[in-house]
Amino acid sequence: HYIRIDCANLSGLEFSSYKPFLVGRRPDVPVMSLREDGTALVDGKPFFPIGLYGVAPRDFNAYDIDRGFADLKAAGFNLGHSYSVARDPAFLRAAAKYGFKLWTGAVDATKLDTWFVEKGRHDPTHLAWYLGDDTWDNTTPEQLRDRYEAVTAIDGRRLTCQADPIRSDWAKDHYQDYVNYTDVFMPEIYPLHGDDKDAACVARTVKDMDRAFADIAKYGDGRPRAVWPIIQHFRGWGWRKFPTAGQLNAMSFAALIHGGKGITWYTYGGYCNEEKKQFNYGVTSSAEVWGALTNVSRR
């Protein structure tokens, strides 16, 4: 059910908000929370997320998602995400089979769909609801607040998260107005473009991580927050090169040294279209690229 609240004042300023509430069964799933220091807890036990974006049936796994999760498990991963098959029963079964947790989109406060209410919130594999992707470009702070309040009103047993490049070189970065509307921030740390700035990739990683925690300290409401960095391991989408194995290693561990309570990488697979001159490559594009990542993820 929804309550719609419409307000107006004598100056002509107007505001509308949808607030959902549920008459129904509570999820019988583990409670996901954050310890005071930002460590993720699953029913009170510490959990360190090691995740990968965009997992799906691809050439690399012979279009067998069970095999895909088996490969990821062997490589040390425990957290998965998908854009294309996140709600597919085969994807959810494979994640559960190999002991994975998931983070999945649940973004519109005014359209909490049947799957989210009747199935998603009852699925014990879900660690977090993903409320913003490139948040600053797509979502106002007020919209993210409404999403956060709506999702947690219906499912208060999961964490919430958002992803955005923090823009640590800007006077006003992308995170500061959004700090209080998810539990977890996932800074998109993609510093390698194939130019003379690439040598600063580790320094940029440190700067972005430190800026995120500075925002939490300055703009946060005092509740625990966590930062799970997203480290670049792709080529395409305007970025002209993969990190070297050394750069990937250094950026990943620098992000953890500077406060990451989990880590993810972007992305599992890319999409190429010769007609459109699109050539985007993820971590499964070659044995060398996959090996560089899994050397880090296993450790």
Image (cartoon, helix red, strand yellow):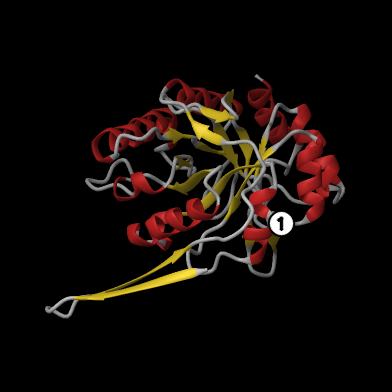
Residue for point 43% across, 31% down: 199
Name the amino acid, label 1: Arg
List the single residue furthest toward the left.
11
| Mark 1 secondary-structure assignment | loop
Q: Which residue is mark 1?
A: 87
- Total numbered circles: 1
Q: Is residue 294 above or below residue 270?
A: above
Q: Residue at (40%, 31%) from the top-left corner?
A: 200
Give x and y (percent) for residue 263. Answer: 55, 32
Whole-percent x and y of residue 54?
66, 49
Q: Residues within 10 Å of mark 1 (few under 14, many from 20)?
A: some
Residue 170, x across and y down, in percent: 26, 46
Residue 198: where, in percent of width, then height? 44, 36
Q: Say which quarter of the image contains residue 111.
A: bottom right
**Quarter of the rendering occupied by the C terminus:** top right
What residue lies at 57% left-to-right and 61% top-to-bottom? 23
Q: Is residue 58 visible?
A: no
> Which residue is found at the position 24% from the left and 36% from the top?
218
Q: Is residue 143 left or right of residue 49?
A: left
Front position in the image: 111 or 278 = 111
